[in-house]
Every structure is written in C-alpha cells, then in structure tokens.
Image: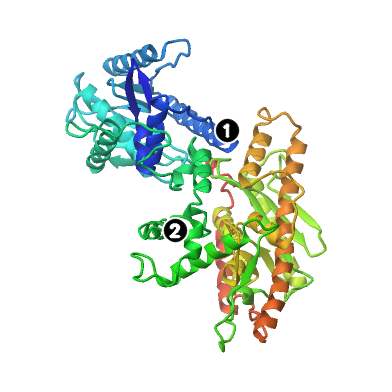
C-alpha cells in the first residue's frame, strides 16, 4: 500500500494480507495516512527465505534461456522517481508483449490503482485465443519456494491476470506456479477456476479501504479502533508483528493462554471474557455451554489460565500433576506412565535442519548425547568433499546415525532414544524414504517403541504456568541453563546459511559450525535433564496417589521371520535397481 501521485495504490500483497489479517490492513492505512511510521522488521531468517527465493527465480530463468527462449527483462532502476519508474516499467512490459517476446521477466502492471510485478510472462501460440497483437497471448508464471500451491500465490497471480487480460484483450486459459524443491514442479492451474473467488476477495478489500458509493470506509486511526491484532499465521512474516505482540501482552489477551484456539477465544469474547485473568476467574462449567467449544476443552484452557495467573511474578514457573480421579488407577501408556525404566544405554537425540538449503531442504546435524554427557555430532558432510553439506552427505550422516542407534540397541536391549516433539521420528521416516536406506533399522526402532517423546509425557502429565510448552519455555521449571546465545531453531538455520554462503558472515566457518554444535548439545542436554526431572515427578505422582506408576511394556522391534526374509529379497532387488541412481535428487 503506497501513495503514487497523491493517490493510494494497492498490490496483490495488500490483498493477500487483508485476507490473512484485517488488522494489518488497518495498520497499513494508518501508515499511509501518516499516523504511524511503518516498522522495519530485522529478521535474518526472512532474509534467508528471500535470498533462496531469488535463487529459485534465477534457476527458472536459466532453464527458460537454456530452452532457447528469448527473454526481455524489465529493468528496475533505483535512480528514478517512483511514479516515473513504475509507468516506464509498465510501458516497457506492454512494448515487449507487442513485439511478441518469448518470455518477459519482471513484468510490471499498473492501472493507476493496482500495481503488480509478475515474475514471468510466457508467450503461448494460440489461434483460438488470439491477443490484440495476433495469434498468441501471454500467461503468468510465478516462482514460489513452497512445495505445494498456496492460496495466496494463486490470488497474486489472479491479480496479474486481471491486468494482463485488460492489456492483451484475452484471458489466458492457464496460470503456472513454479514450486520449490529439486523436482522444480510446475503446477498448471485453470484460470477460470479461481477468478470468481479473486474478484469477490478484491471487492471485499476495496470496500474496506475505499468504501462504496453509499458507505465511506472508516477513517484511518492508530491504533486501529475497529480491528484487533489476533495472532494468525501471517504474523510470522509481518513487519507489524512486534507491535501486535506488545498490544496483546498489554491487554492480557486470551491468546497468551497456552494451547487456546481461535474458536475458543471467539466463544469466550462472546461472553465478555477478554483477558487471561478473567478466564482464570470465570466459573466452570460455563452455563449455558459456549458455542463451538466442548466443556472438556474449556475446562482445560480455564485451568491453564488459572495456573498462568498464579505463576505470574514468581521467580520460576510452577506446575501441577494430572492426578487420576479418586479411586481410579493411573492410566497406563499416558503422561508420566509412558516413561520407560532409565537405562545406562539411553540416548538423547536432536536434529538440526534447514528447509531451504539444497532445494529439498537438508538435515545437516544429528546430535546424540548419552547419560554420561558424551556428545556425538554427526554432520551431513559429503563423503568425497568433506567441506560441503550435500544430499549424499545427508544420506551418509543418516546411515551413520542409524548404525549408531542400532549398535547401541544391540549392546543395551532396554535402552531408549528420547526426543522432544515429533520432529525426530518424522525426520527418520522421511530420510529413510528419501534415500531408500536403513528401512529395517527405522522400523525396528518404531516397532519396538524405542523412540520416547517427552513432549507427550509433559502435555499428558502436568500443567505449568507457561505460555508455551516448547522445551525452552519449560527449562526454568527444571533448572536447565543454556551455554549458547542462539535463541531458537531459526537462529541455527541462519547460522548454517551463513556457513553455506560464508560471504554473508564475518566469522570463520569453523566457528559458525562450533556454535551450531554447541547449540545442539544444549538441546540434547536439556532433553536429558528434562527426562530426569520427569522421573522425579513419577515419584511424586506415586506418593500422592499411593499407586505404582506403570512403565510401558518392553516390545521386540524385530520383524517376524517370514517378513524379514521377504524384506531381505526386496532390499536386494532394490539395491540392484538403484545402484546407479545419484544420491542428489537434482542429479537424477
């Protein structure tokens, strides 16, 4: 949203932002009116995504050029006045279409109200759909890092298509979304399937910012009076996010309650319960029941709000155990009862991954800690070029990890692998499928119940005065103090990207990797300390209930004999068929 020649000008980004968060649009209108200055969001992880997006776009451009297509690029010159630059770019785009260019890169559309930059216009020969220039027309192709088509991307392209249709006199039949990943899949969508929705969305947005002939829009205000900064997915990339977080905290907003849903917040606000304190003090059960929210789920968020309020101002978080109803036994395989007997062979696992690197993403570090505090860092370094992280290196690292775990299991049959949240077992299954290796070993771990998720033990076993049950929010509860300043997984990704590029950082590569490894070591140490703390809670639970807390039964992870024989034959055949297949998907 910007002013050009004194008039408000909108883009597809403004439309997508409005559909994600109407408060964002209200803030942008306030900034356009000069009531507040737009904040600048310094987010290195977003910079990484932006850079990866440029690289993806450049690869697609190179592919088009390699196919022999003549490309006209619409240049963006920084020394021009903004309005003049946009009008020149729009005129050059029309001129390139008129000349019949094969590909137009960075095409610009401007009708005085809506501005758009399409990544690519592709010429389509069509006597059935001729343009005003002859038996051809153009369709839009946009590059996106995502592995699947998202609604926002389609709306953006529809905005470009509307302007393209106005200029060339015919609506293209198709649009293209060039997705991320080594496969470089090109999703082809039928334009007619989406334009009606786009026009309805655009009409809603236009009425919100410009009003109608009969009803003017609300005057811009800061802070906005009509909308509220409800947390949404778009907050992850929004420049206003920090201000909105502060607003919610100042207001003691219900979104501060750990685990509360948007539907539950809406139902509570309908009963004039707007804050965490009000929810904590509300009588339970609600009478009449809240619309769209079960009594059980509302009791859960009420109790969560209560303990958060009780814990405010205390030196560290407080907790409560979930106790069985009086006279009822402790439920097996749930909460603290999922914890197996500690064993000298127990390991603690944490993976570091970068979803943007190597086209398909990469798990670049497998960190393992044992009960003696011995840490093993397995990097995804290429076997032939150890200074590089590659797909072949990821395969080798994964195989080394699986061999380590299985060897440990052979020596300590009662050992378990502890992790926090489901990423690790999901990653093992994904890597097993991606690299077609160690399938039996992964199956053995999963079938034998070797992987223990401490997040599940926490969420089913206790309630704590925290706003999030991430492991870092829980660490003050069990007294773990980190050694490394990296703040979160995003920080690790940024550091890894700096190592990949190196020119973007000013420290030696080895120092960056040392920091990442130390961050990972903190993660697995925290998991170990959490496991030990949960063991003390088992004793507390047993004492308070006068019951023995069950342990999960030991299960063999070995496959049945007949299955093992069949799998061996399949594995032998698979190795023959894939012997010459490169490890890197991009090279296949």
Label 1 Cα crowd, 10 Å radius (few <14 / some 14-19 / many 20+): few
Q: Quadrant of residue 51?
A: top right
**Looking at the image, which is closer to me, 135 or 540?**
540
In the image shown, does 563 or 198 lie closer to the viewer?
Answer: 198
In percent of width and height, residue 394 lies at: 64, 49
Q: Residue at x 58, y 53 (%)?
A: 435
Residue 187: in sight, yes or no? no
Q: Position of residue 91 (x, y in %)?
A: 31, 14
Q: Nearer the viewer, mark 2 or mark 1?
A: 2
Q: How many marks?
A: 2
Which residue is most to the bottom? 327
Q: Secondary structure at mark 2?
A: loop
Q: Residue at x 43, y 36 (%)?
A: 223
Residue under numbered circle 1: 42
Q: CA distance from mark 2 to mark 1?
A: 28 Å
Question: Residue 321 location, x and y as percent?
Answer: 62, 73
Q: Is residue 411 visible?
A: yes
At x 72%, y 68%, the residue is: 533
Above/below status of 17 relative to 546: above
Left or right: residue 384 compared with residue 329: right
Q: Residue beneath label 2, please?
A: 261
Q: Quadrant of the N terminus?
A: top left
């Amino acid at each position: 949203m910007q002013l050009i020649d004194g008039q408000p000008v909108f883009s597809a980004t403004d439309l997508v932002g409005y559909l994600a968060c109407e408060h964002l649009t209200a803030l942008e209108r306030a900034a356009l009116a000069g009531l507040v200055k737009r904040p600048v969001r310094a987010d290195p992880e977003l910079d990484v995504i932006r850079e990866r997006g440029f690289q993806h776009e450049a690869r697609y451009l190179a592919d088009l050029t390699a196919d022999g297509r003549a490309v006209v690029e619409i240049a963006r010159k920084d020394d021009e006045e903004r309005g003049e630059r946009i009008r020149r770019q729009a005129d050059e785009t029309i001129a390139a279409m008129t000349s019949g260019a094969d590909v137009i890169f960075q095409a610009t559309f401007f009708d005085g109200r809506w501005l758009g930059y399409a990544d690519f216009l592709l010429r389509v020969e069509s006597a059935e759909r001729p343009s005003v220039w002859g038996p051809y027309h153009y369709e839009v192709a946009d590059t996106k890092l995502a592995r699947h088509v998202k609604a926002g991307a389609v709306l953006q392209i529809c905005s470009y298509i509307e302007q393209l249709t106005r200029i060339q006199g015919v609506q293209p039949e198709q649009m293209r979304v060039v997705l991320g990943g080594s496969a470089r899949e090109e999703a082809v969508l039928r334009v007619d399937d989406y334009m009606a929705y786009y026009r309805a969305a655009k009409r809603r947005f236009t009425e919100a910012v410009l009003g109608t002939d009969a009803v003017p829009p609300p005057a811009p205000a800061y802070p906005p009076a009509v909308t509220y900064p409800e947390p949404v997915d778009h907050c992850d990339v929004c420049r206003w996010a920090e201000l909105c977080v502060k607003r919610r905290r100042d207001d003691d907003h219900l979104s501060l309650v750990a685990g509360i849903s948007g539907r539950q917040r809406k139902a509570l606000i309908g009963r004039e319960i707007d804050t965490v304190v009000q929810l904590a003090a509300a009588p339970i059960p609600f009478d009449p029941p809240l619309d769209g929210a079960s009594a059980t789920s509302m009791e859960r968020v009420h109790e969560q709000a209560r303990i958060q309020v009780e814990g405010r101002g205390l030196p560290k978080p407080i907790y409560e155990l979930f106790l069985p109803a009086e006279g009822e036994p402790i439920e097996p395989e749930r909460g603290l009862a999922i914890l197996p007997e500690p064993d000298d062979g127990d390991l603690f696992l944490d993976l570091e991954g970068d979803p943007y690197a190597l086209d398909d993403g990469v798990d670049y570090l497998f960190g393992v800690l044992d009960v003696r505090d011995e840490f093993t860092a397995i990097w995804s370094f290429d076997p032939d070029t150890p200074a590089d992280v590659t797909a072949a290196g990821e395969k080798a690292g994964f195989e080394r990890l699986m061999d380590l775990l299985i060897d440990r299991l052979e020596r300590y049959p009662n050992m378990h692998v502890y992790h926090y949240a489901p990423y690790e077992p999901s990653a093992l299954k994904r890597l097993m499928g991606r690299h077609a290796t160690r399938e039996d070993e992964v199956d053995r771990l999963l079938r034998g119940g070797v992987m223990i998720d401490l997040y599940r033990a926490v969420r089913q076993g206790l309630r704590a005065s925290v706003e999030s049950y991430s492991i870092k929010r829980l660490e003050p509860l069990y007294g773990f103090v980190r050694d490394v300043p990296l703040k979160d997984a995003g920080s690790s990704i940024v550091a890894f990207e700096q190592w990949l590029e190196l020119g973007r950082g000013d420290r030696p590569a080895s120092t960056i990797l040392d920091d990442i490894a130390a961050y990972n070591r903190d993660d697995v140490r925290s998991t170990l300390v959490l496991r030990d703390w949960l063991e003390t809670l088992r004793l507390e639970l047993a004492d308070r209930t006068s019951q023995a807390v069950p342990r999960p039964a030991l299960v063999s992870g070995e496959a049945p004999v007949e299955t093992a024989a069949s799998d061996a034959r399949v594995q032998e055949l698979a190795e023959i068929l894939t012997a010459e297949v490169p490890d890197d998907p991009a090279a296949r």
